[in-house]
Amino acid sequence: MPGRHSGVPGAGTGPAAAAVPRRRRSRRGLVVASMVSALVLLASGCGWIALHAGDPHTFTADGISGKRPASGDGQNVLLIGSDSRAGGNRALGGGSGTVGRSDTTLLLHVYADRRHAVGVSVPRDALVDIPPCLLPDGTWSAPQKDVMFNAAFATGLTADGNPACTQNTVEQLTGLRVDHTVVVDFSGFAAMTAAVGGVQVCLPQDVYQRDLSPGRTTRGALVFHRGLQSVSGQQALDYVRIRHGIGDGSDIGRMKRQQAFLAALFRKIKAKGFNPTVLLPLANAAVHSLTVDPGLGSAPDLLEFAMSLKDIDLDNVRFVTAPWRYDGPRVALVHPAADRLWAALRANRPLPSTGSAPAPTSAAPAGSPSAATDRPGAGIDVAVDNATTVSGLAARAAAALTSAGFTVTRTGNAPGQAPAATVVEYGTASGDRTDAAAVARQFSGAVVRPSPTGAAGVRVVLGPDYADATAASAPPEDTSPPRAASDSPCSDLSYGGPSATPSSAP
């Protein structure tokens, strides 16, 4: 709803608009697609777009809860990415699952001054309470406690998902009234990125086919080269879906890259300008690939919403992730930090201050790398792979190794069966075995052995013993600063990723 106040202090806040997933798409591309649809029509003021583009699909409002927060200043839009493989999405996303899931969800708050906005990503694995939701047979589900956030969209097990249930969950979680919801699927996302002429992205390392499909037995062909490049269509979809090949292979890292993609997309649309030649293909792609709430059910409605964003500068669009920490294999929202964030948005205030990096634990748990002050790892390079199903372990081990003086060359996931205990592998190069012994001393009970591939260097493969040890300690919280739409696409590419990021293509 339009706000009643005209001024918003601080650059760390911004408008919020809710987007509802039209179909499940990989979480990575959903948010991007939703934002594209909104920005596509943005700043155009031309009624001909509404006449030529047609109307988007809508979902019924019957499932929206009767117990809703009051309207506040500014506007909140829920953007949902659907990973459904139904219909034309199967060729783009692979797989054959027919139940719609929300792999990406972003709450966009547009401030009342219409000059600032902030997009808040909600981790799909975050443990939340889901209120009663309308099922396909007309009954209402029982409330659920402490379940994964993306279970809301899957409630009812339909191909189109349950955007109303996700909206109800977000409203209960945040106390913010969602004004609009938008859902985007694989095919819609690909079409919109192609219509805008591609989006500039950045990779911290080369990415191969196995990084997209960890089940492959070989590395496969090069998919993305390290550094800056422009992507669109299927390639853009591949970029926002990458998880295993970058950083610690976690969903958190993927969300950060999705935020970078959205920022780059916003820059591209603002820079490209708006004219019939540019806008009509984009408008057509948007309205034919979205599922929206009834309030955005016509092209004129979308146009009116888009026009509300035209005065927002790049520096005044921020992206953040709801405060979180690991809770075993899942994610827990951190309180009271999350409560302060929701309260600020409800009051249309700037974002609360945040730190600049994940907070280190005060002490390393048994079985984890020590935080030795004599930096025994000085001059030793090591790669870290997580062979367990617990997200974020490679990032935690890398942080502790770095504090002990080691240089972590990369982090990632290890395909195949996890070893019974953490393994430190060494190659054939001179000094590798000695370096491996130094690394192993940072892990209680680690097994040292030659690399089965004979590759040079030292590699840590984290086993369930490390997962058990870290589960007993207080996990680090993510306190990363907001990303502005004007930030470099090469900055803060991935949680748990390499410390250095490329500034240009090789």
Image (tube, rainbow, N blue to C red):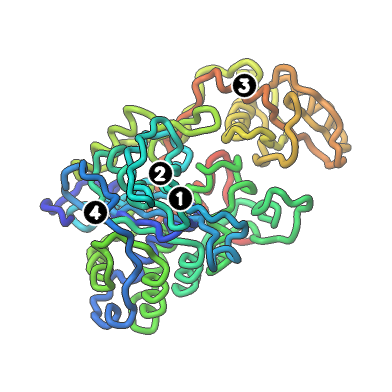
* Labelled pair 2, 3 in contact (Cβ < 8 Å): no
Determine crowd level at label 4: few under 14, some 14-19, many 20+ residues with C-alpha closer than 10 A. Answer: many
Disc 3 is placed on an element classified as helix
- State left or right for residue 381 relative to residue 391: right
Residue at which label 3 appears: 468
Marks 2/1 in contact by CB < 8 Å: the verdict is: yes
Q: Earlier in the sequence, mark 2 or mark 1?
A: 1
The spot of residue 204 in percent (x, y) is: 60, 51
- Please name the residue shown 62% across and 25% down the image: 467
Mark 2–mark 4 distance (CA, rounded to whole Å):
18 Å
Task: Say which amino acid is labelled 4.
Answer: Asp
Q: Visible in this render: residue 316?
A: no
State whether residue 396 appears in this view: yes
Q: Is residue 422 above or below residue 266?
A: above
Q: Mark 1 belongs to which amino acid? A: Ser
Q: Earlier in the sequence, mark 1 or mark 4?
A: 1
- Residue at the spot x=43%, y=58% of the render? 160
Tag nearer the camera, 2 or 1 = 2
Structural distance between the alpha carbons of marks 1 and 3 = 29 Å
Residue at the disc numbered 2: 152
At 34% from the left and 83% from the top, the residue drawn is: 276
In terms of image quadrants, where is residue 55? bottom left
Tell me, for residue 179, which label it has, or none: 4
Q: Which quadrant, please, contains the C terminus?
A: bottom right
Q: Position of residue 395 (x, y in %)?
A: 59, 34
Of discs 3 and 4, which sits in the foreground? Answer: 4
